[in-house]
Amino acid sequence: MAVKKMEMINIVGHMDDVDEVAKRIILSSSVHMTSAITEIKDNDFPILKAKDNMDALIDYYYIKQYASEKNLPEIEKKIDAIYEMFGNSKKVNAEYINEDYDFTEDVKKLNELYELVKGSYSRLTELNNKYNNMMELKEYLSYIKDIDVDLSELLNMKYIDVKVGTLSSYDMDKLRKNYENISALVFKIYRDKDYTVVMLFIPKTVEQEMQRVLISLNFNEFKITTKLEGTPANCIDSIEKSTYSIKQEADSIKSKLGDLEENNKDEIEKYYSRLMMEYKIEELKSNVACTNEFFYLTGWIPSYKKSELSECLGEYESKLILIYKDVDEVSEGVTPPTCMKNNRLLRPFESLVKLYGVPSYSELDPTSFVGLTYMLMFGAMFGDVGQGLVLFIMGLIFSRAKKRTVVGGMLSRLGVCSTIFGFIYGSFFGFEDVLKYRVFKPIHPMANINFLLGAAIVVGILMLTVGYFYNFINSYKVKDIENGIFSKNGVVGLVFYWGLLYAIYAGVKGIKTFIPLSAIVLILVVLSVVMMLKEPLANLIKGKRPLYNESKSDYYVEGGFGIIETLLSLFSNTISFIRVGAFAINHVGLFIAFDTLAKMINNGAGSAIVIVLGNLVIIGLEGLIVFIQGLRLEYYELFSKYFNGTGYEYKPIAL
Amino acid sequence: MDKNTKYCAVNAKVLSMFGKFLKDEDYKNLIALKSSSEIAKYLKDNTAYGEFFKDRDTSKMHRDDIEKCLKEGIGHSIDKLINYFTNDYRDFFKCFYSRYEIYDLKSIARTIQVDRDYSQIKNSMVFAGRYRHIDRDSLIQARSVSDLIYALDGTIYYPYLKTLIDGNKNESLFRFEMTLDKAYFNILDDKLKKLDKEDINIFTELMGCSIDMTNLQWIYRGKKYYNLSSEEIFNYSLNRGNKFSYKKIKELCYLNSLEEFIERIKGTQYEFMFKGDEKQDIYMERRMNRFMYFKLKSFKTKASLNIATVIAFIELVEFEIRDIISITENVRYGMEYDEAKKYLIKAL
């Protein structure tokens, strides 16, 4: 739970080991890489303190960014080619990466394999190109298929050259506007929104000039390489025949490779997995600084993953200089990434928090609070046994079948809460008379409107109070006296809030307060003055000068309005929670509307359809609204009290 | 969307950004400086560009470094402004800005074809891929113009460029540049159509002048230097001019001699381009820019709730940056103040 402690990791090692170390770091998937060069520039890199390896020091002045020498795309092309021939899908198999291997050996073997299939592969690509060319030709011919001319005559004229191709509509427009100066006949044979297919008849004497003009028009010529005889319609027939035979030849080539494929299926998967690893290694190394002999690597690692990393490094650990530094040892201004870790129940709600912002390293991770309150509020607003179960099942489908764990996880949890509240409200797909109770009496929302609204506000007040405490802790962590004690979200703010609530409650109910009401009002006024003076007070305690960051008059004008704003926002933040109760009632109301419709139809099947439809609408529409309203309460009413979300996420490099 | 919601905020922002332009005083000071590193230092310490020189060692900065920093500055202000617009308007501005991307692509192409100094490619890329995906790594690895085109597969430029792939090697750079420019105006035109009528009119009026001048300059150069056929000149000319419709442009393209051409321009508002003095060709670009400079300035003062203020700002920032670059270049030639200011867009 909460934000994990991070440490900065610095590794120095010999260049010969860089690939292997990189590989092991990736396999441990525990290090969030940072650029070593920047780190060295900021002097955070502790190499100068590492007295036991003088060689590294001597080379220090030749530090440069690591530059890759491997030509991985070349290898990938070959693997792609083989995959295409074998026709199976790419897959990374971690098994092949975990074992010891030498990638250069693999590349050699891969090249041997590639040599075997190269011949067939190039033939296949050739056939493919031919096929595509034929299909394109067929398309062009289809535009002119109604002409009754022998194409071989048309294309082989002695004094006239024939060209086919496309022009963009912009260029076509240019051509049209200047047609009188063009020394060719232009036939539009097909026209689309973006381009025009044209056929040009150019006298051979002006071919050169015309070519230049066509270039300036960006003419996309289609060169006819196939021999054409007979009318366009005849040609289309013969093209169809030859494309069929091309297809057949391609198939036969592929089937011949069957044996080879069977023998090498695992091999190629191995090469592919390792290639992907190489790419990752290169990615990692792009952050590495190096000299001729040594490499330097920096990153962040959560403390609890240190043992995992050391296990992965194995015997290499003794060959490396490994230095861990605590966050407070790192120079100021460098903030570590935030690694959030929550238990299974709450993990999906991390994404709700991240949607707003990743908590900074020094902040509390609000996920547990958000998760619990969000489930509570959603359940209260959308309490129904049947509909809740539908959501739960949808959630399971999402997470199991569609692999959308976050959405699925959230939906299923919300569904369960909805079901629980459904039992409390006694509602099953909207019907409040289906469930039979022995132990307790259900609270039907429509019958207990005032109770529900009141309860919602009370729950809201409790949640807001917890929010205050979050802010106290966050402010304490960064030693922010102004925000933690004197501001409207600080200790003073909370006392003010509860004082105000007490005074109002006592006033409304006519209860005798433990001290006179006027004294409470006086305390409240004093507290609001303290809130107004928060900046000078905080600076006074810290001994910071000047007391005001801006001009005094500006500060007090702003502070004066600030008090009014505080009052208003306390009021509105509290009242805002009434929606939790209101939506619970609304939920029933919506169903009543559909129920009435069903009764008006007064026919078995029709009514059933309306009820089913109504339930679908309620689950879809109402579910969405409640989802958003809950989010609003979390973000606006609660996060604004205590959450900054200015951190960045911990993303370890991993395969 | 309502004009108030669309322009009130962004215009306020832009007007405050206008306040950060260099003052005449700054220009004088800059011209008086003796080296590019001094200029960089001045910009860092005394101007709004300072933040883009932050953390940079100015003592070794050359013209290219300064240019890169200033371009970063443009990118920064673009990022700010784009956030004020939504949907079609945002699209339009992104396209409007793709000319900077095109600058980048052109300079990459030139590096590849002419300088052959491949290590420079990475440095030329300030904007490439800023708003739309461009595969920067493949661009860096390109070793010929056709490699470059392949690397652009999947971008908005590719459909325009793909016909160039197996073309003539010697001309490929020229055609690459021309096609990109044409693509830019084409794409922009498409996006422009989706704006409000008032904004379309203002934009066409502003940019129409620029297009007119570019066309005239193109015809002049095509006839004088490149020896192109009239058809080619016409095909590469731009649409949507203000004073010169395609008919007039066509007539100009088909004139037999340069003298006749210049005769035709006499009496139009663009007469100043062809004054007939000996430095006419050198000054032409600067004269065109200065014409636009005054036009934009007048648009800015008329500021109302439309696209004019933003466009004026964008263009004027670019002019200012070009001026700073010119000043940096002038330093190398050791020009005096009176001589140096002749090469600036801003009238001092």
Image (cartoon, rainbow, N blue to C red):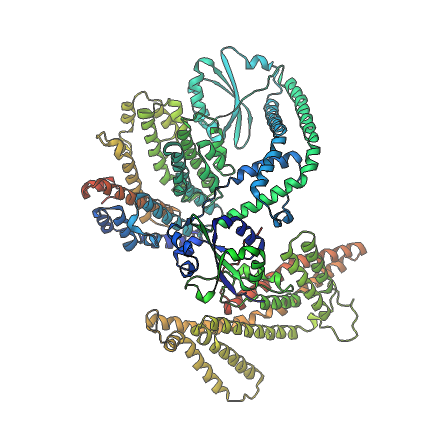
Residue toward you, A83 or B95 = A83
Residue toward you, A348 or A127 = A127
Q: Give me the residue at 22% from left, 41% from top.
A: B340
Q: Is residue A245 above or below residue A107?
A: above
Image quarter in which the N terminus of chain A is found? bottom right
Q: Give me the residue at 53% from left, 40% from top.
A: A72
Q: Is residue A550 above or below residue A394?
A: below
Residue toward you, A79 or A579 = A79
Q: Is residue A184 visible?
A: yes
- Quarter of the figure with residue A398: bottom right
- Quarter of the figure with residue A579: bottom right
Spot the residue most to the top.
A158
- Quarter of the figure with residue A450: bottom right
Whole-percent x, y for residue A593 in the image: 70, 61
Q: Is residue A651 visible?
A: no
Q: Is residue B340 above or below residue A206?
A: below
Spot the residue most to the right.
A604
**Total label count?**
0
Whole-percent x, y for residue A25 in the image: 55, 54
Whole-percent x, y for residue A38 in the image: 41, 54
Left or right placement of residue A329 versus residue B59 in this view: right
Whole-percent x, y for residue B76 in the image: 39, 50
Residue toward you, B87 or A498 = A498
Left or right placement of residue A488 versus residue A192 in this view: left
Q: Give me the residue at 46% from left, 51% from top.
A: A288
